[in-house]
Amino acid sequence: MKNKLKVLRAERDWSQAVLAEKVGVSRQTINAIETGKYDPSLPLAFKLARLFNLSIEEVFDPRDY
Amino acid sequence: MKNSASQDPSQSRGRNIAMGAAFGLLVGGGLDLILGDTGWGLVIGILLGALVGYWIKIPLPAMQYPPVVVRRIVLSAVLFFVFLFGSQWLLNQDIGQPYQILVALAPSIPAAILGLSIASAIAQLDELQRRIQLEAIGIAFGGSVIITLCYALLIQVGVPQVSWMFIPLLMLLLWAISKLWTMWKYR
């Protein structure tokens, strides 16, 4: 699923490791989400969206589904 | 923008050596069973695997477990090998029949502890890593079923039989290989 995670992360100058630590997952998970190889679970998607003060739809593009 | 966490080269080399040794242990253990259960296959496998791990320059994909979890797995594995070789040594001595059964089954206790330690380590992983493990275990299970079925069919045409110990070794080896592959897939 396409998403704006990389852009949102860049705006805050966070590394993948920093973002991973903030939501309690591994750096590999953040990388896989950013590259669209893995779609996060609903709880993780909520965590990520809340971290950026956005809704899930604003972070993840649902048009693929 | 910082994209990845910095990796200590000596740490990744150490991990490569450990992973190589683990692969070598599984392959060497299998060869040892085929070639006559001398124990040298294990030693040569571990040494060759560690050497290959040392020569691989790129860091192999690995999961980040908390140090306490790694310690628990390593300790259980060491305990398993101590029990395994200890029971083999005792069985070669002249001990009574009732004790032989207990001694022969003794390595199953640390094996169960090792299994529980690995299960507890997997439970502490995040959702993607758990998915990687699940896919890897699924591939290993399916692969083991196919290979053992083929082998069982080949026995009918005279292929020599090997120890049943070959099956867990095969499953572990396939699990390790498929884990590397699934980690690479989600890299």
Image: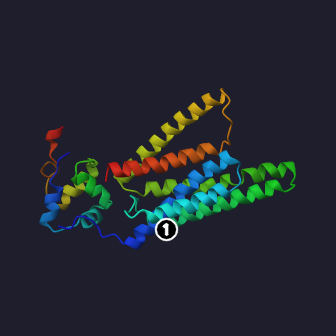
**Amino acid type shown at disc 1:** Val
Q: In the image, residue B79 lies at what x, y percent?
A: 64, 62
Q: Residue at x 75, y 51 (%)?
A: B104
Q: In the image, residue B131 lies at what x, y percent?
A: 38, 47
Tag count in the figure?
1
Q: In the image, residue B69 lies at what x, y percent?
A: 49, 64
Q: In the image, residue A43 lies at what x, y percent?
A: 28, 51
Q: Residue at x 67, y 47 (%)?
A: B35
The answer to which of B137 and B117 lies nearer the viewer is: B137
Q: Residue at x 22, y 48 (%)?
A: A36
Is residue A53 in sight in this rendering? no
Q: Residue at x 62, y 30 (%)?
A: B154
Which element carries disc 1, helix, strand or loop? Answer: helix
The chain that hosts pointer 1 is B
The answer to which of B60 and B109 lies nearer the viewer is: B60
> From the image, which quarter does the C terminus of chain A lie in?
top left
Lateral position of residue B97 relative to residue A44, left or right: right
> From the image, which quarter does the N terminus of chain A lie in?
top left
Give neighbour class at mark 1: few <14, some 14-19, many 20+ (Cα, 10 Å): few
Instruction: Please name the residue that numbered disc 1 is placed on.
Output: B68
Q: How is the image coloured?
A: rainbow
User: Height in image: B160 above or below A39?
Assistant: above
Is residue B141 in sight in this rendering? yes
